[in-house]
Image (cartoon, grey):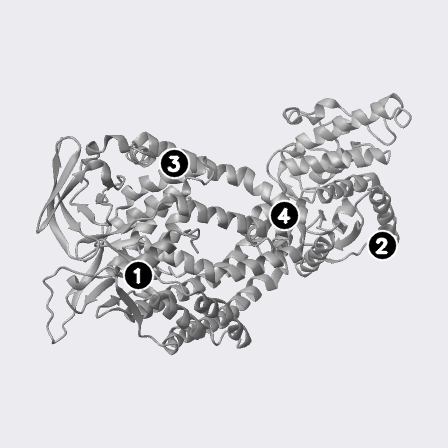
Amino acid sequence: MEEIIAVAPMPPPPPLPAELPTAPGFERIEYPFEFHGDAREYFRIWIVNLALSIVTLGIFSAWAKVRTERYFYGNTRVADVPFEYLAKPWPILKGRLIAVVLFGGYVLAGQFSLKLQLGMAAAIALLTPWLLVRGAAFRARYSSWRGINFRFVPDYGEAYIRYLLLGLPVLLTFGLLYPYVKGKQKAFFVEHHRYGGSWFSFRATPGQFYPPYLIAWGVIVGWMFAFSITAGMLMVVFGGIGGTAPPIWFIYLYVIPLYAGYFVIWAFLAAALANLVYNNADLGRHRFRSTLKGRRLLWIYAGNTVAILASVGLLIPWAKVRLARYRAQTFAVLAGSDLAAFRAESRTDVGAAAAEMDGLFDIDIGL
Amino acid sequence: MTDRFAGTYFDGISGRGHVVELRRVGASHYAVQGDGIERGGALDKIAITPRLARVPRTIEFADGARLLLAHDAQIDAWFPRRRGMEAWVDRLERHAYAVALAIFVCVGTMAAGAIWGVPWLADRIAEQIPPAAERALGDQVLASMDRLGLEPSVLEAERRDALAARFAKLANGIGDAPGYRIEFRHAPGIGANAFALPGGTVVVTDELIDLIGDDREFDAVVAHEIGHQQYRHALRQTLRSSFVAIAAAFFAGDVSSASTVVIAIPTFLLDSHYSRAFEEEADRYAFELLAQHEESPHWFAEAMRTLAAEMPDDGQLAYLSSHPTSADRIGAADDAALAFARTHPELCPNGVCPGEEPVDDDESDCDDCEDEDAGDPADAESPSLACDKDFEV
């Protein structure tokens, strides 16, 4: 869910070579992300791992996930040092089994009684914040750069407030509070991450989430209005004469542009939100620069969709590499001080982290 | 064997990288040296990340330090006993035949899913839709068809009542399927047609009634439509062709969202065709239902011939599709008629049932239709056209 844009390793991190200016004039030095993945190379990995996942009825998918992540992390570099994905397949397999059981229970419950299914849905909703935290913690813990790991420090109470309880006022205000809640959720997500001994912080206020959403909502309303009028007129022109059933192509002609409009708006909104989040996330004295363009992102998403459909899925690797490359191109660390000062967490902190790491709940559930 | 690799060493505590050299010492030891780093030990105390494309290899030390090797080094030779599953997968990924086989497996699975998986899922969903919901669905379909060009019937009321009575007699025999109902509609834009809607409503157009010569043909047509409904063909076929709705319904576990297919059903019934398997299934059902009411499947063949003969010349193929299955279906009906005559000797003395022309067996074969003798009495209403056209009844 958090990975609106990111197929590439998402945790934004940073330390750098020692010879950085620690000038009091506070010059920031930009270190762009680089992505060196190659579509053909990744295709081989993807197709072989997919086939193995199919023939093992999904069990291999955990290994496939590790290989995929390692490929994208390992091909993403900052200051010429690649990221590393360190997770082992077993916890991922465990997480997936739990997800299958939950989801299968939900689907099966529907076969027996609606009440049971509603009960399952409520149980899954109650579990969601916990799962989000576990997923973030897992990903962060096994993301590494320069031999130092990221970490997501769980705060379940806060997670339940921001991902579950705040849903109520959103409903009561017919969605008007949605950008506010989204802002609170992003802040929670950023502020609970750390890289080694340093915390991430978040400068954006929830209010800053309103302009992108308000623009998107306005455009959607305008689009639906203009579209219904045009479609209505066409309907009269074509259907008015014979009074016969509209041919099937007419229905597609109606539905496709309608959804295309949503797609366009969504791409621009995704770009704006990702930029807002990353440009306001700090790590110590370091900042990030995210310069996604809605137009480029739309072009990439649209091209990817067409290519995937036309190739019955075989161009998925190409699409993922293309997106990861663009994401890296538009992302940079702005180093604000001597990055050699980055340290791992102190030993006592590591102790706490290790206890948690070996716990029963070291699972990954991708949400 | 290479025994020296350049790399960058991170001690796991500081983010500072050290340019070092990794060296093999003897058969079972290593040493790391350079930029103030000096460490060494037994090879079996360190690990190496599995090979993957051009991703840099990393030596993992037990204390959390990491050594990133400058390129995809040939270092696996140092760890001969560590070739696990991932090494095997890596070889597959680099092997052209393995990749080709993987493409075959993936595309084949997808094709199998489309061919068998989707119909299977669609049928499971159709099974779950409760009768009341199906009924409501059928009513919506009829309402939208009425908007799309069906008009109130202009048949005389007595005629309609008589036909409705015949329909009721047929439908009453069906044990567990309440709610069969017939609707007549005038449909100038659609022509002779009959549909079974979800929930048990059978719609017959005035144009079809005008065409048929014998009321037993009407029985045959509606028996066929009842067959479609008994197997819920309209729902199943529409669900099969709207995969998105299926997926949504299945994964959301919410069968009611499958009812969004309601918009697709009228268009389907008017413009598209059942699969051949569905038609044959409904045909067989009709033969049995007719036989239960002591009517011969002959009338089904008759109805098919009548409809084919009246196919308009203007290319309006509302109830005719171009694939040549109807000859086979007529043939099957004729065969069923012969079987009926054999099993009902009290109704059909000498194998000829009342009102039937003698059935020429050859007639059912499409190849023979082309050179049929125009003088053949049985053929009077059955031009060769009937052979390569199929009706949608």
Specify the amino acid type for callout 4. Answer: Ile
- The CA distance from mark 1 to mark 4 is 53 Å
Q: Pointer 4 indicates a residue of which chain?
A: B
- Residue located 39% across and 53% down the image: A305
Q: Specify the label residue A349 is tagged with.
A: 1
Q: Name the one closer to the observer, B103 or B344.
A: B103
Q: Nearer the viewer, residue B177 or B154?
A: B177
Classify mark 4: residues with Cα within 10 Å, few (<14), some (14-19) or many (20+).
many
Residue indicated by mark 2: B156
Disc 4 target residue: B125
Q: Earlier in the sequence, mark 2 or mark 3?
A: 3
Q: Give the foreground label among 2 and 4.
A: 4
Q: Nearer the viewer, mark 1 or mark 4?
A: 1
Label 1 in the same subunit as label 4: no
Tell me the subunit letter for badge 3: B
Where residue B69 appears, as percent x and y from the top left, is 17, 44
Circles 2 and 1: CB distance less than 8 Å?
Answer: no
Q: Is residue B352 above or below residue A205?
A: above
Q: Which element carries disc 4, helix, strand or loop?
A: helix
Query: Is disc 3 on the same chain as disc 4?
Result: yes
Is residue A37 shown left or right of residue A246?
left
Q: CA distance from mark 4 to mark 3?
A: 31 Å
Residue at 26 percent across and 46 percent down: it is A38
Spatial distance from mark 2 to mark 3, Cα to Cα?
63 Å
Upstream in sequence: badge 2 or badge 4: 4
Q: Secondary structure at mark 2?
A: loop
Residue B155 occupies which quadrant of the picture? bottom right
